[in-house]
Image (cartoon, rainbow, N blue to C red):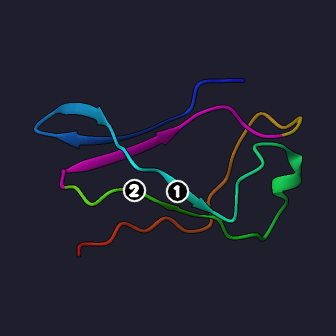
Amino acid sequence: MPQRSHCLQRSRTWTDVTGRRVTPSYPASSAAGTNKTYVFDFETTTGDGGRIFGGTGGTQTFTSLAELAAHYR
């Protein structure tokens, strides 16, 4: 399985985030389907940038996002 990572940048240094929860469980295959919503939630932290990367699901060589949001709490 390809490496997947969710990182947060603080003062130009990338750090892996902790406490990842996905709802519903993300299948990392073509079963993820189209027009579906998956919520990725992490422990509360601060930073000045974010990145998500990893392998695609199914036979496709790309991943698309219709919406990505980061919230200040």
Give the amino acid at mark 2: Phe
Quarter occupied by the N terminus:
top right
Residue at position x 78%, y 70% in the image: 35
* Position of residue 45 in the picture relative to residue 42 (left or right): left
Quarter occupied by the C terminus:
bottom left
Q: Are marks 2 and 1 in contact (CB under 8 Å)?
A: yes
Residue at position x 40%, y 43% in the image: 51
Residue 56 locus on image (x, y percent): 72, 37
Residue 43 locus on image (x, y percent): 33, 56
Residue 64 locus on image (x, y percent): 67, 53
Give the amino acid at mark 1: Arg
User: Which span of residues is magenta-colored?
Assistant: 46-57
Q: Is residue 18 above or below residue 36?
A: above
Q: Which mark is residue 21?
A: 1
Residue at position x 52%, y 56% in the image: 21
Residue at position x 88%, y 53% in the image: 31
